[in-house]
Image (tube, rainbow, N blue to C red):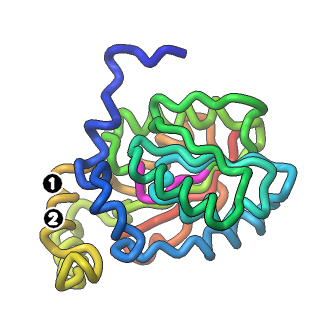
């Protein structure tokens, strides 16, 4: 499939910092990503050495690197070359040979081979507006085998419109004091202004329209972060 000219350039949406090798070098320390819970969840859903896992918006590949020993094939997908360079380096250092790195995004990745059994994504969908999230969900559904699992997490607001200001201000009040310690209030405010986190009550009908059945909702009590486990119908 040739990406239509009216599709956005996901490289432009990625945020310039994610394309900067110096920033990427400190990304894991800043983000504090621990794939253990997500990996345990996927293993509990049946992920095994017969399966193919695709991670869309992989970043530095925390989940693929942890999951590779449990899979037949892992595809780490990201628009950022510096991010993928880290994945390749870490895989080589760990002697992992079943991770494939592909420079692409939600709207441009073309899967090659048997349909994946699992698709995963962590904190990447907020780079797409709601219209393009729906298009991404449809592409993921089309990619997965029937009954395949889509598990993802991001900033999704489980609040009513009248609660937004209080919930956001409480969240911002807990921001890191310095960039080296995590996401600062200034960085989070930039996210809110310029990126596309949305409401859980908008995400859910998007998934259903794209052909998914929502099986598990995780973390909605936080009102800020949520994860969904969905199965392709």
Viewer-closest of 11 and 93? 93
Q: Are circles 2 and 1 on residues that touch, CB within 8 Å?
A: yes
Residue at the disc numbered 1: 193
Q: Is there any visible trace of residue 143 in the rendered image? A: yes
The disc at residue 18 is none
Residue placed furthest toward the right: 50
The number of callouts visible is: 2
Which secondary structure, mark 2?
helix
Question: Is 203 left or right of 120, judged from the image as shown?
Answer: left
Q: Position of residue 208 (x, y in %)?
A: 56, 41
The residue at the point 57 percent across, 71 percent down is 35
Q: Position of residue 189 (x, y in %)?
A: 15, 64
Question: Is 144 left or right of 153, judged from the image as shown?
Answer: right
The residue at the point 46 percent across, 70 percent down is 220
Q: Position of residue 141 (x, y in %)?
A: 62, 35
User: Is residue 124 within the magenta segment?
Assistant: yes
The residue at the point 52 percent across, 63 percent down is 227
Q: Residues within 10 Å of mark 2 (few under 14, many from 20)?
A: some
Viewer-closest of 159 and 118? 118
Classify residue 180 by image quadrant: bottom left
Q: Which residues are magenta?
A: 120-125
Residue at the disc numbered 2: 189
Which secondary structure, mark 1?
helix
Q: Is there any visible trace of residue 166 in the rendered image? A: no
Question: Is 124 left or right of 95, judged from the image as shown?
Answer: left
Viewer-closest of 174 and 54? 54
């Amino acid at each position: 499939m040739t990406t239509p000219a009216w599709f956005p350039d996901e490289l432009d949406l990625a945020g310039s910092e994610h394309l900067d090798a110096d920033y990427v070098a400190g990304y894991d320390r800043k983000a504090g990503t621990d794939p253990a819970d997500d990996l345990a969840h996927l293993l509990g859903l049946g992920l095994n050495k017969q399966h193919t896992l695709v991670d869309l918006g992989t970043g530095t590949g925390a989940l693929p690197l942890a999951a590779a020993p449990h899979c037949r094939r892992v595809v780490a997908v990201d628009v950022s070359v510096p991010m993928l360079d880290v994945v390749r380096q870490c895989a080589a250092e760990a002697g992992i040979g079943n991770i494939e790195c592909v420079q692409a995004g939600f709207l441009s990745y073309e899967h090659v081979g048997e349909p994946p059994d699992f698709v995963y994504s962590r904190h990447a969908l907020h780079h797409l507006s709601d219209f393009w999230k729906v298009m991404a969900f449809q592409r993921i559904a089309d990619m997965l085998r029937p009954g395949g699992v889509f598990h993802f997490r991001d900033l999704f607001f489980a609040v009513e419109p009248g609660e937004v200001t209080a919930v956001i201000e409480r969240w911002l009040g807990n921001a890191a004091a310095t960039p080296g310690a995590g996401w600062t209030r200034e960085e989070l405010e930039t996210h809110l202004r310029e990126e596309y986190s949305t409401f859980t009550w908008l995400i859910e009908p998007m998934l259903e329209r794209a052909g998914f059945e929502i099986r598990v909702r995780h973390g909605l009590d936080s009102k800020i972060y949520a994860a969904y486990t969905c199965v392709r119908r």
